[in-house]
Amino acid sequence: MSQKRPAQNGRASGNSGQDVRAAAARALAPVIAQQGSLANLDEHSVVARDRSLLKELCFGTCRQLPRLEALANTLLKQPFKKRDSDIHALLLVGIYQLLYMRIPAHAAVGETAGAARLLGKEWATRVLNGCLRRLQRESEELQATVDKDESVALAHPRWLLDTLRNAWPEQWRTIVDANNQPGPMTLRVNQHYNDREAYLERLVEQGLSGELCAHAPDGITLNVPCDVTSLPGFAEGHVSVQDEAAQLCAALLGPVLAPRHGAQVLDACSAPGGKTAHLLEQFDIALTALDSDNQRLSRVEDTLSRLGLTANLQHADATQRDWWNGTPFEAILLDAPCSGTGVIRRHPDIKTLRRKEDIRKLAKLQQQMLDNLWPMLREGGTLLYATCSVLPEENAKQIEAFLARTPDANVTTPDDVAWGTPSGHGRQLFPEAGRHDGFFYARLEKRTA
């Protein structure tokens, strides 16, 4: 007869339902307090069978956080103390389950309330149980009340709703709706091994299914996400996971790189390495992969290692030139640090962690990078500017200002492509449900003297 393992330091109890909810609360508490990120989520804090549930609880709660917070405030007689932020997070996890998941209500309530014991706070079981059972009884009324606030109903902070509405009066609601849905899993097929049609057949043989991407020639979007270990040939480098919008980078640089074997290319903000790898798969180039974060640069190294590719990895700052040997580059990819407002559905903690004042700081950093990198580009060379943002201040306005102060810059952004919408001197993609993320591209050429 098996016995439950005793809880130790608030850890595993032997009840995986409570374990996974306690783990979600621990992971969410620092995010909600704006002192952490879901990028640090430790999926191995729970048993293997619960890892997908842990991820759904954490990411889903963050995706609907403004609405969940409003409901929690209504349900509680008084807010939890700061030292009980984990219990507050646990309540949000419980509300998320009741409203957005197919978990039976009795399990959502019982396992969530019981998880408070694993956090060392048995007193909270009664509070959580009472709040969640009240939500069950008064769900429609409570939701209708909080949804009178538009930012609550649409699960976005007010500043972001206003910014999106002002920037994109016709598209803002579509952007918001897409942000509130999980992003699809899209693959990039390595043409050295298969074309994507042949690889799609391999997927079907493995019981997986997908659709060819409309715009990325190497892309397949899966109908249902899966673990990468289920993908045929993943370990051997036959396929990678990369959003369709991000894959367009290689197509935009193709006319420049395809005819220039051995071209010197810089990927100025390369981590985690998806675009770096795609360029190396496609073209015979000498690529320098730069990143200011050494830990993130190690992810580039891991990516290239799996794919059997090589690059010159540089731990350096793209706003500085102390790392540059003076040899000009044929092409520079600047996938600039940005607000991430085009990929909120993949990083929903952005809604909590990002602030309005961050946008101006990011735009300043992007400006510094553009101005610093441009002199490293040879005459006749191409710089491709990219962000995963949908905000004009980081995109169209950024490029407009750069052109105004850079007389030898010429716009070569294509206007005959089927993706995106014209935005200043670039093209803007918006996040689309079941399809690509939000992204901006502008392609610039340095005029010859």
Image: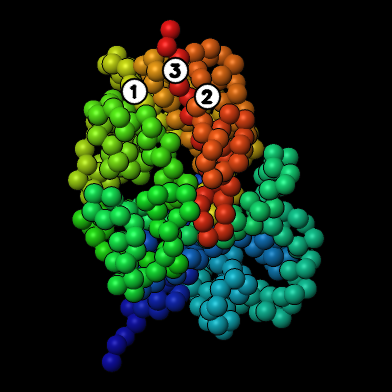
> Disc 3 on helix, strand or loop?
strand
**In the image: residue 180, left or right of residue 331:** right
Picture quadrant where residue 324 is located:
top left
Circle 3 sits on which residue?
446
- Which residue is at the front of the view, 321 or 444? 444
In x, y percent, where is residue 318? 40, 25
Picture quadrant where residue 383 is located:
top left
In x, y percent, where is residue 16? 40, 76
Which image quarter is the C terminus in?
A: top left
The Cα–Cα distance between marks 2 and 3, rounded to whole angstroms, is 9 Å
Three-letter residue code for mark 1: Glu
Circle 1 sits on which residue?
330
Decide which of tag 2 and tag 3 comes sooner along the chain: 2
Give me the disc on residue 411.
2
Work out whether residue 333 can be spotted: yes
Q: Residues within 10 Å of mark 3 (few under 14, many from 20)?
A: many
Decide which of tag 1 and tag 2 comes sooner along the chain: 1
